[in-house]
Image (spheres, rainbow, N blue to C red):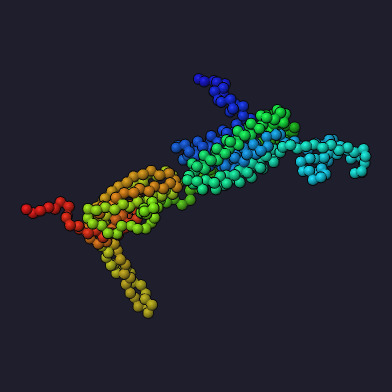
């Protein structure tokens, strides 16, 4: 088994020397790309929390790290001194009064000035969220004018590249500063303080409050995790539709073939959408039907406007003959679509031959009809017999 120390030394020197916060940013970039693009993991809800944390915070944090590599200094307060803005409108300087033994004009009061060369932790976090919200849409706007467009893979590549470049610049600028002026996340001090607060509380009341706070955090994390891992399904349905391709290569719901010669074919594109909130196996069965419309006037009595009774007339479509022409299968994840071009070649002749694409999620029943599925689309066509019937020939 390879020791962790060996794996650490196997990393490039630049990665090993990264500050902890910038190394965490690089790790989150890698984790987000895996969660969003990996074939199996991308189908899990894991991509949602990781993707949100990445898009809303990491690019802005890396950008702030590149702009402000130095440690932010808190205003100096000597004793019980108060802080006031320096004269001349200099917002980067603070003044601290060391004594208030007399009135404001007391000559015994001394003042000291402290320069703030960086930003503190709260400002850094706030800027990280704000810049992320600003930078990511700008990257998408730039991609909109490129051949790649605003799609998942180009967005991930562009945002990841921006973040890694900002991390590299930030790490380089920190290394150029003296060690005591570099920004560093005091995570060790936070861990030590948290350990002391939990292990050695000042009183029983503090211990109870610590337990209550930990339980609240666990409950909040569990609630968010449940909402992400078990989302509300909402309406579940599938869809099937027909498309054709224009001369410019655009798919449109128009221009369907209406007339055929027997033995000739025409291309049609069948589309399937999955909104079942689960990965589903689909089968599309193409059938041709000889149908007859029958008037049925035996449906109850209805009262006419003059008070007399009249029979309601209902037209019923009866299938006299049916042939299966083709069958297609696909597997789609939730919210995924599938477009399948294929050649349609009717074998029946006559007017108003009905071509029906029957969509069956999961299993195909023994009886193929519009009554055994909730999803189908049909097309009415006229089929001419043609000059030579299939199987025919000269009598001689």
Residue lying at 27% horizontally and 65% vertically, measured from the top left: 294
How many marks are shown on the rendered structure?
0
**In this rendering, does residue 47 appear at all?**
no
Q: Position of residue 194 (x, y in %)?
A: 68, 32
Please identify the quarter of the rendering in which residue 96 is found. top right
Q: Position of residue 291 (x, y in %)?
A: 26, 60
Residue lying at 57% horizontally and 44% vertically, measured from the top left: 136
Q: Residue furthest bottom?
A: 306
Q: Note whether 382 is above or below 306 in the view shown.
A: above
**In this rendering, does residue 283 appear at all?**
yes
Q: Give left or right: position of 297 versus 143.
A: left
Q: Note whether 37 is above or below 345 in the view shown.
A: above
In-front residue for pair 385/331: 385
In-front residue for pair 269/239: 269
Please identify the quarter of the rendering in which residue 227 is found. top right
Residue lying at 52% horizontally and 45% vertically, measured from the top left: 143
Residue lying at 62% horizontally and 34% vertically, measured from the top left: 169
Q: Position of residue 324 (x, y in %)?
A: 26, 50
Q: Give left or right: position of 284 versus 3.
A: left
In-front residue for pair 158/257: 158
Q: Give left or right: position of 282 versus 36.
A: left
In-front residue for pair 294/159: 159
Q: Note whether 276 is above or below 119 in the view shown.
A: below
Q: Position of residue 304 (x, y in %)?
A: 37, 76
């Amino acid at each position: 088994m390879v020791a962790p120390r060996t794996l650490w030394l196997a990393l490039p020197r630049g990665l090993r020397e990264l500050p902890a916060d910038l190394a965490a940013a690089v790790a989150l970039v890698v984790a987000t790309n895996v969660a969003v693009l990996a074939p199996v993991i991308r189908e899990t809800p894991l991509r949602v929390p990781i993707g949100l944390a990445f898009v809303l915070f990491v690019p802005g944090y890396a950008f702030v790290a590149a702009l402000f590599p130095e440690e932010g200094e808190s205003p100096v307060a000597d004793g019980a001194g108060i802080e006031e803005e320096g004269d001349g409108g200099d917002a980067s300087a603070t003044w601290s009064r060391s004594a208030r033994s007399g009135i404001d004009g007391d000559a015994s009061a001394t003042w000291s000035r402290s320069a703030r060369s960086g930003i503190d932790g709260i400002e850094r976090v706030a800027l990280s969220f704000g810049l992320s919200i600003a930078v990511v849409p700008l990257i998408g706007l730039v991609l909109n004018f490129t051949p790649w467009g605003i799609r998942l893979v180009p967005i991930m590549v562009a945002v990841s590249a921006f973040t890694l470049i900002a991390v590299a610049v930030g790490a380089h600028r920190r290394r150029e500063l003296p060690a005591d002026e570099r920004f560093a996340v005091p995570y060790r001090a936070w861990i030590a303080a948290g350990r002391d607060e939990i292990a050695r509380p000042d009183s029983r009341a503090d211990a109870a409050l610590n337990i209550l706070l930990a339980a609240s955090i666990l409950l909040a994390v569990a609630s968010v995790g449940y909402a992400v891992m078990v989302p509300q399904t909402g309406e579940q349905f599938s869809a099937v539709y027909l498309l054709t391709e224009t001369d410019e290569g655009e798919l449109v719901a128009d221009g369907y073939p209406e007339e055929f010669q027997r033995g000739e074919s025409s291309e049609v594109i069948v589309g399937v959408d999955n909104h079942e909130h689960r990965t589903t196996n689909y089968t599309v069965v193409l059938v041709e039907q000889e149908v007859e419309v029958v008037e049925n006037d035996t449906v109850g009595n209805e009262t006419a406007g003059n008070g007399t009774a009249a029979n309601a007339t209902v037209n019923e479509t009866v299938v006299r003959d049916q042939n299966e022409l083709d069958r297609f299968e696909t597997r789609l994840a939730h919210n995924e679509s599938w477009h399948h071009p294929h050649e349609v070649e009717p074998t029946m002749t006559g007017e108003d031959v009905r071509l029906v694409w029957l969509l069956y999620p999961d299993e195909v029943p023994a009886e193929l009809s519009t009554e055994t599925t909730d999803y189908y689309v049909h097309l009415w066509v006229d089929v001419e017999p043609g000059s030579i019937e299939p199987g025919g020939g000269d009598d001689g």
